[in-house]
Amino acid sequence: MKHLRILCTLFTATLAASCLSSASALTGVSSWAKSDVRAAQAASLAPDTFASLDARTPISRAEFCAVALRLYEAERQTKVPRTKKVYFKDCKDPDVNTAYEMKLISGRGQDIFAPKDSVSRQDLCVILDNIRTKCEVDKPKITVSSKSFADSKELRSYAVSATEVMLSTGIMKGIEATNSNDPEQSGQTVTLLQPQGTATREQSLIMANRFFDTFDAKPLKPSDQMNGNDTIMGSVPTAEPEKVEFKKEPAKEQTTQTPKPEKVDSFSQTEVDLNQEEEQFLLMDEPIPVSGTVAEKKAAVFGEGGSYYIEQAVAEANMEEVTVKVWSLLSSGQKTPSTKTFKVHKAIVDEVHAVFDEIFEGDEKFPIKDAGGYTWRTNTRSEHRQGTAIDLNYMENMECSIDKNGKIIKITTGSHWTPILDPYSIPAGGDVVRAFAAHGFAWGGDAWTSKRDYMHFSYFGT
C-alpha cells in the first residue's frame, strides 16, 4: 500500500515538475529543495495559506499545525473535521486548536500558544513523533544517537527520544558547518544537530514528506472516524478546559534589564486547570541544600544585631552595581555571550559574581533575558528592598499560590513556568538552582509550601 502511495505521489510530482503553481505553492524555494517540496505539495501536505509565502522563512507554530494535520490526514487516509473549540486566548485558528485537541502539539503555558513564534528543529521532531504515535505506528529501532553530534548537549531532554526516531529514519538530518571551536580543526566541516535552530517552511515540508514516505499507517476504520466537531477520536477529556484570563502579556526579548513588576496582593485570582504533565512540574523533589545559615548571612549583610532597612536612603547607600556574564538567546535559537547589570547589597557582590560565573560556564548555557536585584518596595520584609534577592526571566518563571497538592490556585506575577518547553524557564535541579544554592541563595521554586516563585532567589530564604 505504501509503495502504491509513493508511486502515485511521484507521478503527480512529475506532472508538476515544470512549476510550483499549485494553490499552496511557496515562493523562493531553494534549488536543492524543489523536487522534495513538489512531492510534499503533490501529497497535499502544504496548506493553502502557504500560497506566495517565502519558502526559506522560518515556519510559525500555527503554520506547522496545519502541516501536521494534513500529514495525519494523508497517513490515515481520512479527513479531520476542525474543532469549534478554542483552547488558547491568543489563537482561534481551527488548525491549531484541532492539533491541540488531538495532542499533536502543546501550548506555551496557561492558555498561551504563541502562534507566530518559529518552530525549533527539536520541537518539529516532537510534533512529528506525536503524529507517529497518533497514527499507531510502532517506534522504529534507534540506530542514530543524538550524542554522536558535537552539539548534542543543546538538545533538551524532552526531545531526545523523538529526535533520535527522526534521525534513525532519515526524516531529520544533521547540518554541515565549519568547525570554529577547535583551532586544530579550523576550516574543517562538522555535522551539527542544531536542535534549537529554527526550521524553514521548505525544510518542514521536506521532513513531513519524508515522514509520509517512511511510515505506513493503517487507514482509520469507519467506526474510528470523527462525527461532527465534538472530539477527535476520544483524545480529550469530556470536560472542556476552563478559560483563563491573565493580567500580563508575555515579554519580548530585551537586551537591557527589565525591572520585575511589584507584586501586589490585590491581583485578581486566576483559577487554573493544568493537564497532568504540567501538574507534575509543580510537584518538586527535595530542595537542593542551601549553603550557610540565615543568622550568619544576616550578620554578614547588616552586621551583628543589624536588621532590615526601614529608610530608602540607608538601603541605597549599601547597594552596589554588578555586571555579570550571561547567555543571550537569539531568535535563530543560537546562544551568544552577553551581560546583565543590576544592583545588590555590597556584602554579597562576590557571591553574586560567583553564581553567574558558574551559570555561564555550566553545560546548560541557560539564557537570561531579565535580571533584577535591588528595588525599594513597600513590603518591609521584601529581600529586594534589602538587595539580597535576584529575579530571573520573570515572565517565564511565574509566581503563584498553590494548594497542598502543589496545584496552582492563582498566578500573581509572570505568565507560566514550563522548563521543558520554554528555554527561559528555570529547571528544578539545573545549573541555575545549583549555582545559587552553593552560594547561599534559596530558590522560590521549592522553598515554601504555600507558593512558588520560580524567578526568585533570596539570600535569607524569604
Image (cartoon, rainbow, N blue to C red):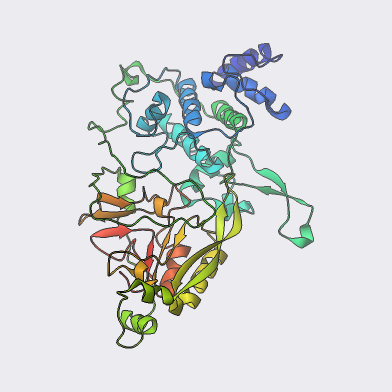
Q: Is residue 394 visible?
A: yes
Q: Position of residue 214 (x, y in %)?
A: 56, 29
Image height of 189 relative to 32, above or below: below
The residue positioned 60% from the left and 24% from the top of the image is: 53
**Quadrant of the rendered image containing residue 380:** bottom left
**Quadrant of the rendered image containing residue 97:** top left
* Residue at the bottom extreme, as displayed: 304
The residue positioned 43% from the left and 53% from the top of the image is: 425
- Front-most of 170 and 206? 206
Q: In which quadrant of the rendered image does the C terminus lie?
A: bottom left
Q: Position of residue 385 (x, y in %)?
A: 35, 69
Q: Position of residue 7 (x, y in %)?
A: 61, 16
* Residue at the front extreme, as displayed: 313
Q: Position of residue 305 (x, y in %)?
A: 29, 87
Q: Is residue 217 visible?
A: no
- Front-most of 177 and 13? 177
Left/right of residue 82 with respect to residue 356 in the rendered view: left
- Front-most of 179 and 371? 371
The residue positioned 42% from the left and 76% from the top of the image is: 317
Left/right of residue 332 with respect to residue 257 in the rendered view: right
* Residue at the left extreme, as displayed: 404
Q: How many marks?
A: 0
Image height of 350 relative to 45, above or below: below
Image height of 409 relative to 312, above or below: above
Left/right of residue 11 with respect to residue 263 in the rendered view: right
* Residue at the top extreme, as displayed: 15
